Image: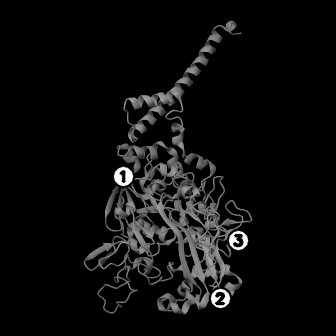
Amino acid sequence: MNSLMMTEQGKIQGALWSFGAKEGYNHTVGTYDTKNPEDPHKRLGTDSYKKYMTELSELEPQGFPSEMTELPKAPTAEEIEKDPSLAVYTYLRQECLRCHTGSKGRAKRGDFRGIGCASCHIPYSNAGLYEGGDKKISKKPGHLLVHTIQSSRKAKVKVHDVEYSGVPVETCSTCHNRGKRIGVSYQGLMETEYQATFDEDGNGQPKLHTKRYLHMQEDIHYQKGMLCQDCHTSNDMHGDGFLSGANLGAVEIECQDCHGTTSAYPWELPLGYSDEFNQTAKTGEPRGTTKTVAEYLKMGSIPDAPEGFILTARGNPLTKAVRKGDKIMMHLASGKDLELTPLKKLKEDEKLSREALVAMDQIQAHTDELECYTCHATWAPQCYGCHVKIDYSEGKQNPDFLAASHDSDIHGTTGGMRDLKKYLVDGKVTETRSFLRWEDPALSQNGEGRISPTIPGCQTTITVIGKDGKALLQNHIFKIPNVEGAGEEGQNAIDMSPVQPHTISKESRTCESCHTSAKALGHGIGGGKLNGDPSKDTIIDLMTADGRVLPTKVDQQIPRIANLKNDYSRFLDENGTQLMTVGHHWKLSGPLDAEQRSKVDREGMCLSCHKNMPAGDLAVSAMVHASEMAGFKIDKQEHGSILNKLLLMGAWLQVLVAVGFGGYIIYRLFLKRKNPRRWK
């Protein structure tokens, strides 16, 4: 992948400090100097897919660059003294580019892998130890588990007495554990600062990908035994031969591709499913299924598909999803076959719960305006405040992973495979955060114009230490001028990012978690009112009641962040003013607009009734006293029943009044026509 934006696009865009103003959101800087093919027809995919991507590229040119240039070189410590913003290149080359497939990555538990094709197709354990039968392969960490290629369901890999096929999820998590963290989240892993639980020797939890984890609920697809490749297509993972500036540009699948909606089977949906997608990207063609994929069948990696393959939202065949009457058969890479019943069939067979019917069938706006995972992703990792320190003091250095990956010899080995010490550059990066959450992520509009869960993308707050050990920048948030509602003063380049969290559950988040939540609207946890002012120093010591500090030797407990006036979780104020960047890669991305917020916000609805209870109105008071005298108890079920009755009574009363009034008007008109003299 050539784009810097693929794995950690939120973090990197927030970090493109020094050339943010001139580069903007054009995504023209990558890991290599490269261009698209001159012939647009060389894009890999069906004719429908090519047509779709041509339209999308024209709509979003900033997300689909025609060429990219290599990232500038890492600066020296002397150059940093003159311009500390150049530290961005140190950060990118030492940290972010470890995951790109031209590099072998770092030798840490869970991060061992190959390079290039071997990044995915050669098995590596967390420990990086060889357990095969070749005695010539070293037993030291950093080697493949067995000398076998892992790929499709036809490629069998044997480890000791276990045989498997497909690419294990942990292979993908070797890289996808940062940024949006979709790999570890899919496995039900959420970062924690703590070491619990203890092993039999009393040792704390070992670090995996340099982190420790809580075990949360795994994604339901993971629970069913589905690997990443069972949903994600070859184009998703390898590209289609043309540049994409952000990962959403490459991902061609939607939940509806297999599940459909309550009113349409997957094969009844048009390509590009939603009219909202970038306004015009829908082709209007019936999606159907396809039999014209002989090239896939010749590969021998999938069963025959007599009724055709299910298509992605962009028009390519999902080669593991085959139509079988009114159901779908999933032929997984693991060798397992799953039968999937689309939503329309579940509705027809009356197998959807009342809650599901209300949310997905009766409230059409949910289907039209929300992603499925907006409700069905019941948690999402939220790492608020990414505090990055780049330290150039005392001759500190670390490897430049991009330079090492570019240095290949006649044998095909790169610098990272030989000796990373030859590629040391000035500076050392350290990262930490302010706080972590996982429950009820906020909402925003994603690049498809649909409401989506939203998490920190990363919120880079930068400290640069110069050669003399003094801060050249301290807790600094860079601003990007003239973007996302900001003028020349600039928008805070700490990003909130729309996300598919890969934490899907059959049960959805509650209605209240969106409709009565200030956080869901973008106003922050607790409405952003729980945190102190981060733009002011926090000093904790002996002090008088009016706040005067008594000792003369004191430390700043929490040094200030000058450009941060609000809590990191607050990206929109009550007036609709945007406080930081939100999903900046695509034109439609951004916070919920005023109309969307007015539809979502139902906070305070309880007061609509309870302001008159028990004694705010004579009739209500009489009903309350009557129920108390009768010993009538109102529990949750009874409360819901009362509200439902009141709704029906109120609706029918208004309808009958309207009908009665209309009937009266018609009657008067009839009398006037019958006896016009009487009505003069």
Please provide percent x and percent y for residue 17.
65, 74
Residue that carries the numbered disc 1 in the rendered image: 341
Residue that carries the numbered disc 3 in the rendered image: 21
Mark 1 → mark 2, Cα distance in angstroms = 65 Å
Please provide percent x and percent y for residue 252.
50, 62
Residue 201, relative to residue 508: is it above or below?
Answer: below
Could you tell me which residue is drawn at 54 percent across and 80 percent down?
Answer: 430
The furthest residue to the left: 161
Which of the numbered marks, if any, corresponds to residue 196? none
Dot placed on the residue nearer the N-terminal end, 2 or 3: 3
Under mark 1, the amino acid is Thr
Q: Secondary structure at mark 2?
A: loop
Residue 581, relative to residue 280: is it above or below?
Answer: below
Who is closer to the viewer here, 136 or 495? 495
Dot placed on the residue nearer the N-terminal end, 1 or 2: 1
Quadrant placement of the C terminus: top right
Residue that carries the numbered disc 2 in the rendered image: 468
Under mark 3, the amino acid is Ala
Q: Is residue 576 left or right of residue 47?
A: right
